[in-house]
Amino acid sequence: MAQRSAVRRMMPLIVVGGVVIALAAAVWFGQRSLMYPADRSAVPPAGELLPGAVDVTLTTSDDVALGAWYLEPAEPCTAAVLVAQGNGGNRAGRVELAQAIHERGFGVLLFDYRGYGGNQAARRSRVWPGTSAQPGPTCCRTPGWHPMS
């Protein structure tokens, strides 16, 4: 009888402990999606949000097509700034930054990561120590590359 009474008194503590453990596990395993909310919706054409910009497609070394926008320099300029959307949202959220950079005379190339802005989701791969990883669009590693060529 005393044993049953002790279990009864401990039951609320066991339930609360189980709920706390379940919540901690949910936060731990879901933290990436909480920190980096991917906006997977397709973005509108470049010209709708960024006058003068054109839609371009970047291709990664493993043949994944990434949507991008390119805004030619306002003045004769040989430099362009590569703008990634960061860890959340998509390139549509970086229009003001692109306009500010463009106003300073630079060309601007905005692109979305894999799985963002309507792009195909990331292909999972491991990079082992001693190997060379080349992330991102091939164009970013190609001297003299131009999005309109």
Image: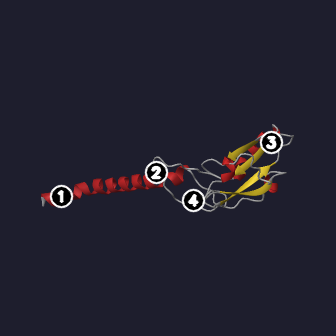
Q: Vertically, is 82 above or below 67?
A: above
Q: Residue at x 45, y 52 (%)?
A: 27
Asked whether 66 or 38 is in front, the reply is 66
Asked whether 36 or 133 is in front, the reply is 133
Q: Vertically, is 103 above or below 35?
A: above
Residue, disc 2: 128
Residue type for callout 3: His
Q: Residues within 10 Å of mark 1 (few under 14, many from 20)?
A: few
Q: Residues within 10 Å of mark 4 (few under 14, many from 20)?
A: few
Residue 89: image x %, image y %? 64, 52
Asked whether 21 or 65 is in front, the reply is 65
Q: Earlier in the sequence, mark 3 or mark 4?
A: 3
Q: Residue at x 29, y 53 (%)?
A: 13
Give the Cα distance between marks 1 and 2.
56 Å
Give the Cα distance between marks 3 and 2.
39 Å
Give the Cα distance between marks 4 and 1.
54 Å
Q: Which part of the image, by quadrant, shows the N terminus?
A: bottom left
What count of labels does the image hold?
Answer: 4
Q: Earlier in the sequence, mark 3 or mark 2?
A: 3
Residue type for callout 4: Ala
Tell me the mark number nearer the camera, choosing from 4 and 1. 4
Q: Residue at x 51, y 57 (%)?
A: 125
Q: Residues within 10 Å of mark 2 (few under 14, many from 20)?
A: few
Q: Residue at x 70, y 50 (%)?
A: 93
Q: Which mark is residue 43?
A: none
Q: Which mark is residue 122?
A: 4
Q: Within the image, what quadrant is residue 103 found in?
A: top right
Q: Secondary structure at mark 3?
A: helix
Q: Which mark is residue 5?
A: 1
